[in-house]
Image (cartoon, grey):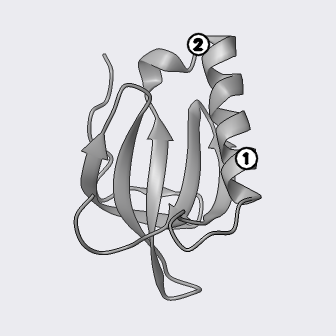
Amino acid sequence: MIKTSFTGQTLGRYRILEPLGRGGMALVYRAYHPKLDRYVALKLLRFDQTDETAFLARFQREARAVANLRHPNIVQVFDFDVEGDLTYMVMEYLEGDT
């Protein structure tokens, strides 16, 4: 069974608060980093995609590529990690519309 909600759980240093959106590749949540007292967007690779090596490599490339970009119209990537069978990217959280 594929888990569809991680609200209320902790992943790494991040407490997952609420879903923000979903796409073909990942689920996105608003999360909180208590040591830095900062809200972040946590992009969690969908479980049904994690067995595909090429898909996981694409997700890792995306994290590296975006982390190297600096532009006012692109959110910053703060972290990328794998915990157990969960792969996730942590990004700057911006309030407002998508």
The quarter of the picture where the C terminus appears is bottom left
First along the sequence among labels 2 and 1: 2
Label 2 crowd (10 A; few <14 / some 14-19 / many >=20):
few
Query: Residue drawn at (67%, 46%), measured in percent from left and top?
Result: 63
Q: Is residue 8 left or right of residue 71?
A: left
What's the residue type where badge 2 is placed?
Asp
Query: Residue drawn at (62%, 35%), measured in percent from left and top?
Result: 84
How many marks the image carries: the answer is 2
Label 1 crowd (10 A; few <14 / some 14-19 / many >=20):
few
**Which quarter of the picture shows residue 93?**
bottom left
Query: SS for tag 2?
Result: loop
Given residues 70 and 87, the one toward you in this image is 70
Query: Residue drawn at (33%, 21%), measured in percent from left and top?
Result: 2
The x and y percentages for residue 73 are: 50, 67
Residue 82 is tagged as: none
Given residues 68 and 29, the one toward you in this image is 68
Q: Is residue 39 left or right of residue 63?
A: left
| Mark pair 2, 1: CA separation | 22 Å
Compared with 59, 16 (above or below) is below
The x and y percentages for residue 4 are: 27, 33
The x and y percentages for residue 22 are: 30, 38
The residue to which callout 2 is attached is 51
**Which quarter of the picture shows residue 61?**
top right
Given residues 42 and 11, the one toward you in this image is 42
Q: Is residue 5 left or right of residue 58?
A: left
Query: Residue drawn at (49%, 18%), measured in percent from left and top?
Result: 49
The residue to which callout 1 is attached is 65
Between circles 2 and 1, the one closer to the viewer is: 1
The quarter of the picture where the N terminus appears is top left
Query: SS for tag 1?
Result: helix
Compared with 6, 32 (above or below) is below
What's the residue type where badge 1 is placed?
Ala
